[in-house]
Image (cartoon, rainbow, N blue to C red):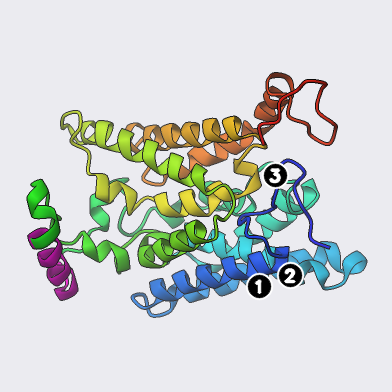
């Protein structure tokens, strides 16, 4: 039987009306496509990271669940999904052993020690990322984007495909609005340079976003809220980080780098990043966006969105208490008499 978080109506990561294993398999499929897209430009290094993380996650899951549940826990694909999401958050050049340790930590400590799917206070993949980041900071110190500047992720020379698409968009669609796309920005969708695997597979993540919207997966409107607030603040404050003026931030580069899309459409849809009520979920999404901008542009952390979401996850229990007393949202109990349901 599929496990469910009592605080979230339709379970882990993707709220499509399917069994947990089916949701996990769909998520795994798109994560694998992202890894494959990234691997096209790194001689398979991204695949090595994914294999190491996946193997460690499955073995770790079996270690703690096989005696009681046999292979049923592994069969729901949640461990594999956590490992693949973690893979997207890691640089493609990282030592695969570090990815394996991060995946084992995600499953054994973050997930299983709190009771499994839906019971963990922190997204397992995010917990694994923090573990790797803190234990082996040097793994993030090499390659593009290590300086904390997204401009380092742009290719030095725009590809022929980039030039063709830009000429079409700039000449026929954007010209009437006085807007234009600079060289190299279209290449971000299939970037061979990007710092983390998610930034090297933007095109696949855009397709995943389309699936989320098409199936109304999870609380997809929290993703839209996050992106809207993040985009507004990035435009407003992003230029100041480089000595510019207000409203001069590079909006397109901010959205297509720094793990913004994987945060909005994968990490934010996990129960640990949401609340039961609509108002609280919206507040958490706004808070995550504000912190993401602050960590990225004021703190100099290109992947500040991951730190921001980890902090929001940690605040989850406090929001649950506020929901109980302010919005009369039940957590395992019937609502108070006269209480209004906001779910």
Residue visible at 75% across and 23% down in the picture: 339
- Whether 235 is drawn above or below 157: the answer is above
Residue visible at 51% across and 75% down in the picture: 48
- Is 112 or 237 nearer to us in this picture? 237
Cβ–Cβ under 8 Å for marks 2 and 1 = yes
Q: Main secondary structure of the magenta part?
A: helix
SS class of the residue under badge 2? helix
**The disc label shown at residue 339, or none:** none
Q: State which tag comes first along the sequence, 2 or 3.
A: 3
- Whether 2 is drawn above or below 269: the answer is below
Q: Quadrant of the C terminus?
A: top right
Say which residue label 2 marks: 59
Cβ–Cβ under 8 Å for marks 3 and 1 = no
Q: State which tag comes first along the sequence, 3 or 1.
A: 3
At label 3, counting other C-alpha atoms closer than 10 Å, the crowd grade (few under 14, some 14-19, many 20 or more) is many
Residue 331 placement (x, y as % from top left): 79, 34
CA–CA distance between discs 2 and 3? 28 Å
At label 2, counting other C-alpha atoms closer than 10 Å, the crowd grade (few under 14, some 14-19, many 20 or more) is some
**What is the span of residues highlighted in magenta in the rendered image?**
157-171
Side of 163 where 99 appears, left or right: right
SS class of the residue under badge 3? loop
CA–CA distance between discs 3 and 1? 29 Å
State the image quarter where residue 155 is shown: bottom left
CA–CA distance between discs 2 and 1? 6 Å
Say which residue label 3 marks: 8
Residue 289 placement (x, y as % from top left): 43, 36
At label 1, counting other C-alpha atoms closer than 10 Å, the crowd grade (few under 14, some 14-19, many 20 or more) is some
Q: Is residue 164 magenta?
A: yes
Say which residue label 1 marks: 55
Residue 200 placement (x, y as % from top left): 36, 65
Is residue 324 visible in the rendered image? The answer is: yes
């Amino acid at each position: 039987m599929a496990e469910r978080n009592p605080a979230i109506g339709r379970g882990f990561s993707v709220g499509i009306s399917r069994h947990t294993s089916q949701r996990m398999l769909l998520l795994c499929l798109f994560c694998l496509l992202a890894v494959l897209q990234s691997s096209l430009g790194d001689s398979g290094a991204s695949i090595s990271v994914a294999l190491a993380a996946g193997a460690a996650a499955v073995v770790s899951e079996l270690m703690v669940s096989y005696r009681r549940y046999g292979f049923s826990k592994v069969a729901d694909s949640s461990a594999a999904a956590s490992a693949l999401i973690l893979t997207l958050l890691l640089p493609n050049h990282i030592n695969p052993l570090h990815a394996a340790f991060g995946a084992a930590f995600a499953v054994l400590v973050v997930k299983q020690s709190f009771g499994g799917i839906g019971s963990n206070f922190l997204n397992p993949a995010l917990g694994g990322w923090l573990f790797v980041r803190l234990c082996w900071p040097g793994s993030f110190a090499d390659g593009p984007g290590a300086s904390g500047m997204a401009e380092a992720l742009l290719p030095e020379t725009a590809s022929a495909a980039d030039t063709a698409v830009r000429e079409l968009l700039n000449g026929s669609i954007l010209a009437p609005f006085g807007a234009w796309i600079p060289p190299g920005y279209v290449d971000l969708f299939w970037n061979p340079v990007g710092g983390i695997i998610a930034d090297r597979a933007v095109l696949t993540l855009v397709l995943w976003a389309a699936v989320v919207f098409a199936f109304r997966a999870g609380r997809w409107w929290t993703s839209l809220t996050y992106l809207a607030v993040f985009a507004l603040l990035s435009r407003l404050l992003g230029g100041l980080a480089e000595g510019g003026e207000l409203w001069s931030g590079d909006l397109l580069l901010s959205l297509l780098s720094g793990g913004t899309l994987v945060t909005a459409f994968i990490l934010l849809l996990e129960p640990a990043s949401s609340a039961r009520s609509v108002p609280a979920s919206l507040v958490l999404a706004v808070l995550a966006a504000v912190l993401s901008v602050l960590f990225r542009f004021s703190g100099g952390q290109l992947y500040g969105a991951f730190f921001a979401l980890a902090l929001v996850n940690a605040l989850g229990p406090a929001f649950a208490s506020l929901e109980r007393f302010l919005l009369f949202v039940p957590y395992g109990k019937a609502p108070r008499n006269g209480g209004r349901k906001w779910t």
